[in-house]
Amino acid sequence: MRTAAFAIVMHAEHVFAWLTPGAQQGLLAGLVIASRCAGAAAHRAPRLAAVLIMAATVLVNLAPPNPYLAASLKVWEQGHFLNFNGLTRLVSVLWPFAALGYLIFLASRRSRETPG
């Protein structure tokens, strides 16, 4: 979705500027991990999802700066989609915590449903 918005607002020839070698490696690693986790047992899925979300959050914070962001900031006009930009930044910061909270809720609900 972000790529499509970037193509509409900015120059279309730079739509896939985000697809750096690091992003390609990350996409490949994500596909491999997703294919291996697809057959996980239902009772282990929330725990596995929580571990993967935490690992992804750590890896994103350790990654070098993305040149895609620098390119978008060069052509960004002051006030251009200011509220939308703030909203996407807020969502990108908060979603891992919301997802972890939901996974904890699921795990606690399952532990109450299973006797013993």
Image: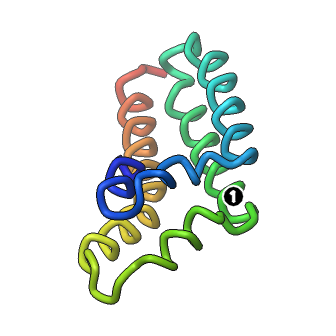
| Picture quadrant where residue 81 is located | bottom left
Q: Position of residue 14 (x, y in %)?
A: 51, 55
Crowd around label 1: few <14 · some 14–19 · many ≥20 (10 Å): few
The colour scheme used here is rainbow
The correct choice, above or below, for 74 with respect to 56 in the image is below
Tell me the SS state at disc 1: helix
Q: Position of residue 31 (x, y in %)?
A: 62, 25
Q: Position of residue 41 (x, y in %)?
A: 55, 13
Nearer the observer, 59 or 65: 65
Question: Which residue carries the number 1 mark?
Answer: 58
| Picture quadrant where residue 51 is located | top right
Nearer the observer, 19 or 102: 19
The correct choice, above or below, for 56 with respect to 37 in the image is below
Q: Residue at x 52, y 25 (%)?
A: 45
Q: Residue at x 43, y 62 (%)?
A: 92
Q: Residue at x 33, y 76 (%)?
A: 86
Q: Is residue 41 found left or right of 67 in the rendered image? A: left
Nearer the observer, 99 or 63: 63
The correct choice, above or below, for 106 with respect to 8 in the image is above
Kind of residue indicated by mark 1: Val
Q: Is residue 68 found left or right of 13 in the rendered image? A: right
Q: Name the residue at the top extreme.
A: 39
Q: Is residue 98 found left or right of 43 in the rendered image? A: left
Q: Residue at x 33, y 89 (%)?
A: 78
Q: Position of residue 1 (x, y in %)?
A: 35, 46
Tell me how many marks there are. 1
